[in-house]
């Protein structure tokens, strides 16, 4: 069973491995295909161009040969025969054969004769047929016995043989004097040179293309592996590790790159941080909630037990137990309400997107209410705001934040029963502060007090009815409206809470 498990696992790993390497494989395949297609298209284009040029050259040369021979043959007035063709093609040779004097003039030199020079060229076969289609002259290479059936006066044929391209020009010969057909001329060019060049080009192109494709494939494989696959493999390894152990502190090490993958690695790390913090928060929340509820439930349970045993008959125990139970039930109700507020505060963007509040008005009202509830306190409101200073916030939420802060200021005040509320504004923001002169908060506690259920002194705060949720709710609300909340405090001297919101410009108010 165990072996089977191991086998399946390694199978799975092997599969994953192939899956992982498939990115490089795909990339290399695409590069190879693209380069091959590009090279083939490029090679075909270049090859066709060169081939075209070489053929044109050959055609020009062959046409020239035809013209040279034709010029000689048209001078013969009768049908072409060996006896009139040979002397006509080589007048100097004829003169030598007839013992005529040969001058030293260059044009009279046998070896300077164009026709003879052409005849010596092994690539070109010249065949002259008489009117009956019989060969009367040829320089002997590719001789076809019978004259092909040609209709037009001049025909050019480019063909293919096993040795490559082949060019034939057929020319009917008409006498210049009688204008009658006297015979036929065929110039057959085997294009040996052109075929050789084209063959060499083909070999080079195939060789170079193969070499280039191999080099590109190797290079692109290396590049894609180093630049893309390696960092992705790193990320994949980390996410597997996190999958195995969600609390793992493994992160993608700094990739030192300023591109999309570097950005991805960063946001991947940030996502892991946030995700783990969120999981931790949730765990903490569930733990804290059950812990917070355990005490009131235990108190109520204790009193119920007491009542069950003796309380029914003892009016004093009955009275005290009922009172304590009610108090704890109230605390639970309060706690549940605060937990609901906290959850709601996390979804503000969706519920109150367009609410606008006049800060001064809400502050006046809240301060007046607090004064009424706590007549023993001197609560003063210093209003430096311009009239009608607006922020983008649902008014009940601003009120809720102010109540939390003022309530704390009162709760944690000692001898000096005084709370100062102040509101001011600058170009961009509205700043509200709530200051007390109570017990203050130690520096190391100041960050923690915004955490859920955090209380500096648990026992004492519980006496005062605090659940440690007020500031979390206030922070969530403020931040949901793009504001900031902070505290400055000194142990024994008091605390000053500051909230800051972006001010609403005239234009935005009306819209
Ligand atoms: P609670 O409902 O317990 O007051 P809060 O979240 O409002 O919960 O506050 C968290 C803790 O921060 C409190 O338990 C208290 O210890 C501390 N705290 C808050 N406000 C003040 C203040 N104005 N002065 C001194 N301590 C404060």
Image (cartoon, grey):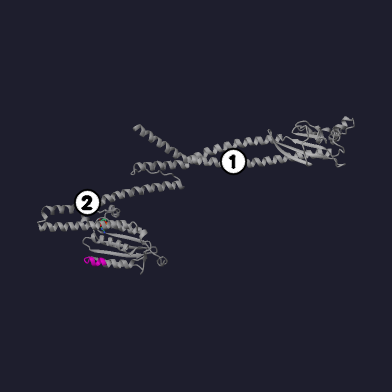
Residue beneath label 2, please?
A: 294
Position in image of residue 489 (x %, y %): 28, 57
Q: Quadrant of residue 127?
A: top right
**Can you give x and y, in whole percent of width and height, for residue 47 in the image?**
65, 40
Q: In this rendering, would 118 be left or right of 44?
A: right
Crowd band around label 1 with a 10 angstrom C-alpha radius: few (<14), some (14–19), many (20+): some
Tell me which residue sits at (36%, 49%) in the image: 274
In the picture of the structure, the residue carrying the numbered disc 1 is 39
Q: Is residue 241 above or below residue 401?
A: above
- Of helix, strand and loop, which one carries label 1? helix
| Cα distance between the residues tagged 2 and 1 | 77 Å
| Whether residue 228 is situated above or below residue 100 in the rendered picture | below
Asked whether, in this view, residue 265 is left or right of residue 245, the answer is right
Q: Which residues are magenta?
A: 369-376
* Residue at horizontal 45 percent and vertical 38 percent from the top: 18
Q: Tell which residue pokes out farthest to the left in this image.
A: 313
């Amino acid at each position: 069973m165990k072996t089977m498990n191991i086998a399946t696992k390694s199978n799975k790993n092997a599969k994953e491995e192939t899956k992982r390497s498939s990115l490089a494989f795909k990339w290399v395949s695409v590069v190879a295909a693209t380069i091959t297609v590009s090279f083939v298209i490029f090679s075909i284009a270049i090859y066709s161009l060169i081939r075209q040029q070489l053929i044109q050259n050959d055609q020009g040369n062959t046409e020239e040969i035809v013209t040279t021979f034709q010029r000689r043959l048209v001078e013969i007035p009768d049908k072409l025969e060996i006896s009139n063709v040979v002397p006509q093609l080589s007048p100097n040779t004829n003169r030598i054969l007839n013992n005529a004097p040969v001058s030293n003039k260059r044009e009279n030199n046998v070896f300077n004769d164009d026709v003879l020079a052409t005849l010596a060229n092994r690539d070109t076969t010249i065949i002259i047929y008489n009117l009956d289609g019989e060969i009367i002259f040829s320089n002997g290479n590719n001789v076809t016995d019978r004259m092909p059936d040609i209709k037009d006066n001049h025909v050019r044929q480019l063909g293919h043989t096993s040795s490559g391209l082949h060019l034939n020009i057929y020319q009917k010969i008409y006498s210049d004097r009688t204008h009658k057909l006297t015979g036929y001329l065929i110039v057959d060019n085997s294009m040996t040179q052109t075929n050789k060049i084209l063959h060499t080009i083909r070999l080079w192109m195939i060789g170079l293309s193969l070499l280039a494709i191999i080099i590109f494939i190797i290079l692109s494989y290396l590049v894609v592996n180093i630049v893309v696959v390696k960092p992705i493999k790193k990320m994949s390894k980390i996410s597997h590790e996190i999958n195995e152990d969600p609390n793992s502190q493994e992160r993608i090490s700094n990739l030192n790159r300023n591109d999309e993958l570097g950005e991805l690695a960063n946001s991947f790390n940030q996502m892991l941080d946030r995700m783990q913090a969120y999981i931790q928060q949730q765990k903490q929340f569930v733990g804290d909630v059950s812990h917070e509820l355990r005490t009131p439930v235990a108190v109520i349970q204790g009193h119920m037990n007491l009542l069950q045993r003796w309380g029914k008959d003892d009016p004093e125990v009955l009275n005290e137990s009922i009172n304590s139970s009610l108090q704890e039930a109230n605390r639970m109700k309060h706690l549940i309400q605060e937990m609901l507020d906290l959850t709601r505060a996390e979804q503000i963007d969706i519920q109150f997107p367009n609410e606008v509040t006049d800060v001064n008005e809400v502050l006046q009202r809240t301060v007046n209410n607090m004064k009424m509830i706590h007549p023993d306190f001197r609560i003063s409101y210093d209003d430096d705001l311009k009239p009608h200073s607006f922020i983008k916030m649902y008014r009940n939420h601003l009120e809720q934040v102010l109540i939390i802060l003022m309530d704390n200021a009162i709760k944690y005040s000692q001898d000096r029963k005084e709370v100062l509320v102040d509101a001011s504004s600058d170009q961009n923001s509205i700043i509200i502060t709530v200051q007390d002169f109570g017990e203050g908060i130690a520096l190391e506690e100041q960050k923690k007090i915004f955490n859920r259920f955090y209380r500096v002194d648990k026992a004492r705060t519980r006496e005062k009815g605090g659940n440690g949720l007020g500031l979390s709710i206030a922070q969530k609300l403020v931040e949901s409206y793009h504001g900031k909340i902070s505290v400055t405090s000194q142990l024994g001297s008091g605390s000053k809470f500051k909230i800051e919101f972006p001010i609403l410009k005239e234009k935005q108010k009306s819209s």
